[in-house]
Image (cartoon, helix red, strand yellow):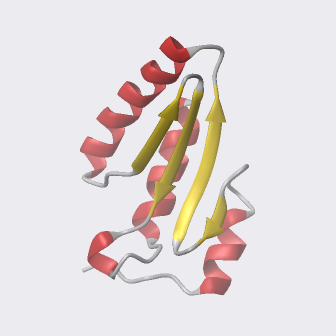
Amino acid sequence: MSEPLQESEIESRLVNLRGWRHKEDHLKKSFAFSNFRDAMAFILRLSYEAEQQDHHPEIFNCYNRVEISLNTHDARGKVTEKDFSLANAIDALA
């Protein structure tokens, strides 16, 4: 089972993640792309990284916008190290 991070640790680590925010026990970020095809390509690339890390985000897509929400189910839906690891990988794909 993953250990939830303390609020102070989450906030201090968010400084290193541009555009991510902590809200309602999730790390969240919105991405905007040129068009629907680019947004879907991003989601596809993201799916390979999520599968490799065995950590799967909530994803919302509307045309060129993709919203990602991360938390760890086996930590009672709280934010853990796994979420920061995947957030960094997602940023590298964008």
Q: How many marks?
A: 0
Give percent across and percent down for residue 28.
58, 56
Q: Nearer the viewer, residue 4 or 67?
A: 67
Tell me what residue is drawn at x 40 percent, y 35 percent.
46
Q: Which of 75/9 is in front?
A: 75
Q: In this view, does 19 lie above or below 1?
A: above
Which quadrant of the figure contains the C terminus? top right
Query: Residue, x 24% and y 52% (percent of image)?
Result: 54
Q: Position of residue 11 (x, y in %)?
A: 69, 75
In percent of the image, x 33 and y 44: which residue is there? 50
**Residue 6 position in % (x across, y down):** 56, 87
- The residue positioned 26% from the left and 43% from the top of the image is 52
Depicted 2 relative to depicted 38: above or below: below
28 vs 88, nearest the viewer: 28
Q: Quadrant of residue 12?
A: bottom right
* Left or right of residue 48: residue 26: right
Q: Where is residue 44 in the image (x, y as percent from the top left)?
A: 36, 26
Q: In front here: 19 or 85?
A: 19
> In this picture, is 85 found above or below 74?
above
The answer to whether 2 appears left or right of 39 in the picture is: left
Quadrant placement of the N terminus: bottom left
